[in-house]
Image (cartoon, coloured by chain):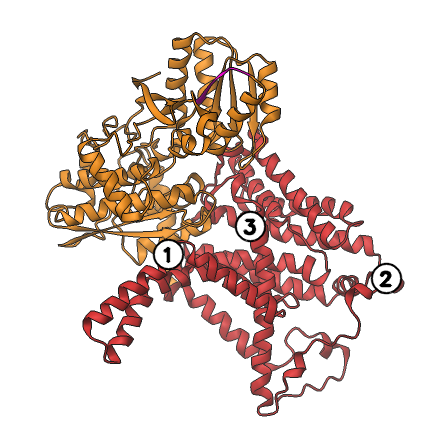
Amino acid sequence: MRFIFKTDYEDDIRLLPHSGYIWTYGTLLVLLALAPFMFSSYIMSQIVFVCIYATVGVGLLILSGFTGQASLGHAAFLAIGAYTAGYLQQYDVPFPVYFLGAGLLTGAVGALVGFPALRLQGIYLVIATISFAFIVEEILARWESVTHGNEGMRVKTLSLFGAAIPRDSASFYYLCLGFLILIIVGTLNLMRSPTGRAFIAIRDSETAARSMGVNVALYKVKAFAISAAITGFAGVLFAHKMTFISPEMFTLQLSIEFIIVILIGGTFSLHGAVLGAIFLVMIDPFLTYLKDDMPGIIAGVAATFGASKATASNIQSNVAAFASANGLKGAIYGVIIMVFVLFEPLGLYGRWLKIKLFFQLFPLYKRATFKRQKIYVKSERNR
Amino acid sequence: MSKSFRALGLAVGALALTHLPAAAQTKVTNQGISADEIVIGTHQDLSGPIKFWGVPVSNGMKMAVEEINAAGGIHGRKIKLVIEDSGYDPKRAVLASQKMVERDKVFAMVGPMGSPTVLASQDVLFDAGVLQLFPLTAAEFTYKFDPAKPQERLKFSNILPYVESTRAGLKYMMELKGFKKPCIMYQDDEYGKNVFDGFNQQLEVMKVPAASVTTFKRGASDFSAQIAKMKSDGCDLVLLGAVIREPIGAMTEAKKLGWDVTFLGATPVNVLEVPALGKEAVEGLYSISGFEIPYEDTAKGKVKEWLTNYKKMFDSPANTQAIIGYNAVQTFAFYVEKAGKDLTGQKLLDALESGAEFRDIFNSPPTKFSKTNHLATTITQVQQVKNGRWVLIKDGLIF
């Protein structure tokens, strides 16, 4: 077990508290850099989606996880980013310009949504953001001269400094990964600045924050703007990855997927956004893999335990029939989410911390360490 | 890093190539073809909002594959069909397509489902030289191709397009009954928009103004506002750019108001579910359609056998969707047969473009492609619900 002896303020806000961080994150970075040489483009494509979803997850974490403002409207922010890219691209605007433009525009829209949201809390804020998402969806379908309406819009291959970057190329992966890392580091910095601490103060108690001199309205709007801008940037990458965008891609379902990303991953740390995105994107290919390969593996195991050839192939076909039943994936998916919400409210990252602490303290780990201390119930709090 | 630079170089090269005139050759893959097997793939919506299409379509496809394999395959090669669920989510469709191209090594994508899903994933196929055959969407992008982009030659469609079929059906109805005030009620999405375009184009040619235009959201169940508006605008023909529930809801509403008006549905209305669920409410409804829906008690010969087999295999009666899925695989098999014993991707492409005619067992209009036309047919029919059944009124229609 390592004890960090902090002697000044700098020690307290360091991004990398000790050398262990450099080793683990350094290794991760090297592995990520080498990934395109190790994996097929099918797997790389999943990792690119993970990067894009994780970027949105970070954006949503700033708003929901750190500032405590729930949103079911992030699909709309993603759409605004994606459509800005698609529209400006028609006029041969270079990538850096429309990338920045999309982020800024989405940020501005996010701030506008933030203003009416000032007076709303909890479930009412969720309803307001949902209606915002519906309005955007409606505009996308109606404003045909810009969005091509329901016919959708083709997005051309990304071109940066005269070189084409197709969506399945290694370069596109590095772009998405690089942007995700930039956003994560930027957010870590933001959260240790006065702005970030004001966000957390608002989440924990608005009254307390206000009494400490935090301008609640200003910081709420800021949180909305930053969160929306990050999602808008992700929207540009999303549009290029999809090569086609239409209003029916940015529905409530997508907003719910983003919420799932941070709920499964864990709402208290940026790790949650990445872990949640990995879960959300990769669960489907993983279940597909199980569907394809599991029957053979199970039959193989049965055969080694002395089952006859006929029984083994019988088992194989039965398992295959079960695994390819329609809707099985949806059921598994639903069960996993329910289990998480019920038994692991801290998400995947919370589980990881518990496992880590278990080995650090072995054999003295106490389950009560992570038990929620009910000093007061949230509803009793004076807002 | 060398690989990524090479990729970058290749990409730049590819971009440079696309700027050259059409001399470039279409690349067609030969993967998935072995001495005794052809692997084909499809992505369907088996769990999402349009699974009432995806499930019967995939059933029809499975049935066709079983029939072909039971008869010894095509030139001794059996078909292996890989089905993936996209849930109508473009992201999952892209990943599913990549999985099928890379892991399963599919030779062709047959009958993939939905407009956004097919559009988002088609470049995966074209880049790998995999044919995109007969997707289940009537949108233009499934057959219109740019001769300057050689990989786009890999797409073929055999679904009756919405715009053309709407024009043909509307023209026939207008001329038959001499309607003066045509109206439209369409679903507010890409499909509805196509029907609306067809409606507008045809009325413009016929120099008849539209009397009323109304829309509804997908999944809507109340049409009282739309019907009241169209009634007060004095419509005598209502074109429905709708699916299953909406024609029933709209006609029920019209009957409630005592409004006697003719309803004409676009092609997706022409499914068994409409008269089965709508009962007497949809009596007299006309619909534009591509082929006749067979009924078990009146069907004869091969079709009757097919209907019985389908029911036996899937424990539910066959419908239009199942026929479309079945035909997608049978059409593929027909052209593979034509491509000859030593099958390659190029040979199949040549066979598809040869102009050879495929005729199905359901008496649909023949399927035929050429080097410049990758759309099978625009020949349209009009049918009507009489005594709870779809009855053919007129076929061989063209606008």
Rendered position, A135 above or below A17: above
x and y, in percent, of residue B324 in the image: 31, 37
**Chain of the residue where label 2 is placed in the rendered structure:** A
- Give the class, few, some or many, for how many residues have Cα within 10 Å of label 1's Cα (few <14, many ≥20): few
Q: Chain of mark 1?
A: A
Q: Quadrant of residue B4?
A: bottom left
Q: Please tell me which residue lies in front, A114 or B62.
A: B62
Q: Is residue B120 magenta?
A: no
Give the letter of the chain under mark 3: A
| Residue type highlighted by circle 2 | Thr
Q: Quadrant of the C terminus of chain A?
A: bottom right
| Dots 2 and 3 on the same chain | yes
Secondary structure category for the residue under label 1: loop
Q: Quadrant of the N terminus of chain A?
A: bottom right
Q: Which residue is mark 2?
A: A207
The amino acid marked with disc number 3 is: Leu
Q: CA distance from mark 1 to mark 3?
A: 24 Å
Q: Position of residue B11 (x, y in %)?
A: 38, 49
Q: Secondary structure at mark 2?
A: helix
Mark earlier in primary sequence (2, 3): 2
Vertical arrangement, residue B16 with respect to residue A331, above or below: above
* Colour chosen for chain B: orange
Left or right: A232 as drawn, with respect to B34 = right
The local secondary structure at tag 3 comes to helix
Query: Is B263 part of what is drawn in magenta?
Result: yes
Which span is picked out in magenta? B259-264
**Is disc 3 surrounded by few (<14), some (14 to 19) or many (20+) residues within 10 Å?**
some
Q: Colour of chain A?
A: red
| Disc nearest the viewer among 1 and 3 | 1
Q: Is residue B47 left or right of residue A197?
A: left
Q: Residue A254 has which mark?
A: 3
Q: Which residue is mark 1?
A: A325
